[in-house]
Image (cartoon, rainbow, N blue to C red):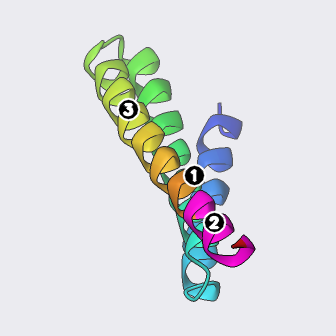
Amino acid sequence: MIFHLLVPFFLFIVGIFGIFLSRKNIILVIMSLELLLLSINYYLIFFSYFLDDLLGQVFSLLILSVAASESAIGLAIIISYYKLYTL
């Protein structure tokens, strides 16, 4: 059970370090934000199962939709940089 509490904690710490260490690269910042959202989802699903409550899983789905839109924005940034530097 302690494993399910330590893994998202370390993911959260890696995400925080990724944001603070790579402020100039927007793609790495977005990837670090994805790690933060992943660790929060892990906690929500774990405590939702542990407390036998469905609300954590609903919030997890909402956070996953935000993460998917964030990934789409990151992909759009990559495509715009590719078009800018290849033409």
- CA–CA distance between discs 2 and 3? 27 Å
Prevailing secondary structure class for the magenta stretch in the rendered image? helix
Callouts 2 and 3 close, C-beta under 8 Å = no
The image shows residue 49, relative to residue 10, as above or below, that is: above
Could you say whether the residue bearing mark 1 is in a helix, strand or loop? helix
Q: Which residues are magenta?
A: 78-86
Could you say whether the residue bearing mark 3 is in a helix, strand or loop? helix
Q: Within 10 Å of the Cα at label 2, are there few (<14), some (14-19), or many (20+) other Cα atoms?
A: few
Residue type at tag 1: Leu
Label 3 vs 1, first from the N-terminus: 3
Could you say whether the residue bearing mark 2 is in a helix, strand or loop? helix
Q: Residue at the location (64% across, 35% down)?
A: 4
Residue 82 among magenta residues: yes
Residue that lies at the very extreme toward the left in this rendered image: 55
In the picture, residue 66 is in which quadrant? top left
| In the image: residue 59, left or right of residue 6 | left
Q: Mark on residue 65?
A: 3
Mark 2 or 3: in front is 2
> In the rendered image, which residue does mark 1 sit on?
75
- CA–CA distance between discs 2 and 1? 12 Å
Label 2 vs 1, first from the N-terminus: 1
Q: Position of residue 12 (x, y in %)?
A: 56, 59
> In the rendered image, which residue does mark 2 sit on?
83
> Can residue 13 be seen by looking at this rendering?
no
Quarter occupied by the N terminus: top right
Residue type at tag 3: Ser
